[in-house]
Amino acid sequence: MQIIILKTSKNECILFAHFKLHTIVVNEGQIVKRGQILEQCGNSGNSLEPHLHFHIQNVKDNNVATGAKC
């Protein structure tokens, strides 16, 4: 599965997943800006059709069910 995890200035972790294989255009440690392209939409991983998985939380372990308040 193609994933990108961004860390915000508020120490929140934002996970984007299920992108098209081999289309990541950002590098680890790179600062990204609003509107910047990260990857192309796809259906990598356990996915039946192209879509974006967007997940935000305030703990780094993305297996923890508690997260940032909306």
Image: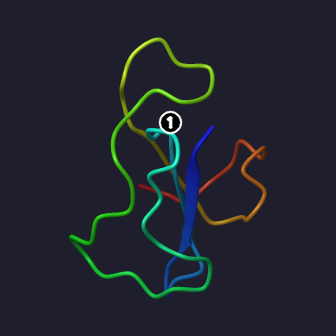
Residue nearest the viewer, comparing 55 with 3: 3
> What residue is rendered at 29% in x and 64% in y?
37
Residue visible at 45% across and 41% down? 19
- Residue 15 as seen in the image, left or right of residue 50: right
Q: Position of residue 69 (x, y in %)?
A: 49, 58
> In the rendered image, which residue does mark 1 sit on?
18
Q: Count neighbours of disc 1 (C-alpha within 10 A) and say few if under 14, some if 14 to 19, many if 20 or more.
A: many
Q: Residue at x 72, y 50 (%)?
A: 62
Position above or below: 55 against 48: below
Residue at image coords 39%, 16%: 49
Residue 1 percent coordinates (x, y) = 63, 37
- Quarter assignment of residue 42: top left
Residue 50 in percent (x, y) is at 36, 25
**Relative depth, front residue between 34 and 58:** 34
In the depicted structure, whether residue 9 falls above or below residue 3:
below
- Residue type, mark 1 in image: His
In the rendered picture of this protein, how many numbered marks are placed on residues?
A: 1
**Residue 6 falls left or right of residue 34:** right
Q: Secondary structure at mark 1?
A: loop
Q: Nearer the viewer, residue 62 or 69?
A: 62
In the displayed structure, would residue 54 be above or below residue 13? Answer: above
